[in-house]
Image (spheres, rainbow, N blue to C red):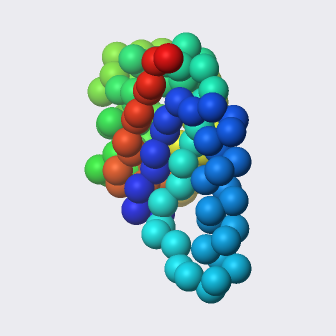
Amino acid sequence: MTKMIIRTDKVESFFTRARKAAQKADRGESFKAMATLSFEDPQEMFMVLSEARRSLMLEVMDEPKSITQLTVKLHRERSAITKDIGLLEKVGLLISQKRVNPGHGIEKVVRTVAPKIEMIATLG
C-alpha cells in the first residue's frame, strides 16, 4: 500500500465512499494502493493516535525497527512500546514480524503499513 488516510467522518460518509468503491469495482476499474481508517469521533482518533504512538509510527515510517531499538530511541519502557504496537496493529497501522537476530534469538521488527500516512480531523 502506498498511502493510508486516517480521518474523522460520519457513518453516512463512510457508506457513501463504500458505495462509490463498489460501483468502481463493478465497472472493473482499478483502485489506488491506499486505504482509509475512519473514526466517527475526533476524540477517539486522538486517543488512539496519542503523541507517543505518533512518535512510534514516525520512527518506523522510513525504516523498520526492532522493539529494542524503539525503546532506546524513544526512551520508553519496553512494555509500553509493546502495548502501543499491539493497539496500532489492531487498528491496521503497523505490522510486526519476527526475525532471527543472529546470536541473540528472535526479535520483533515493526513497520508502518504505508510509507505515507495522512491524518485528517474535522470538528463539527
Q: Nearer the viewer, residue 63 or 13?
A: 13
Residue 103 can be seen, yes or no: no
Residue 118 visible in the snapshot: yes
Say which of 119 and 29 sits in front. Answer: 29
Q: Residue at x 40, y 62 (%)?
A: 2
* Residue 75, picture quadrant: top left
Q: Nearer the viewer, residue 106 or 93?
A: 93
Q: Residue furthest bottom?
A: 28
Q: Is residue 82 above or below residue 108?
A: above
Q: Residue at x 35, y 54 (%)?
A: 115
The reply, left or right, for residue 98 in relation to residue 53 is: right
- Depth check, front residue: 2 or 10: 10
Residue 67 drawn at (x, y percent)? 47, 35
The x, y position of residue 105, in whole percent, is 56, 48
Q: Is residue 18 left or right of residue 50?
A: right
Q: Is residue 98 placed above or below 32 in the rendered structure? A: above
Image position, residue 89 (x, y; %): 61, 40
Q: Residue placed at 60% from the left, 20% from the top?
A: 41
75 to 88, vertically: above or below: above
**Residue at horizontal 39 percent and vertical 17 percent from the top:** 51
Question: Residue 77: x percent and y percent?
Answer: 48, 15
How many numbered marks have been drawn onto this rendered protein structure? 0
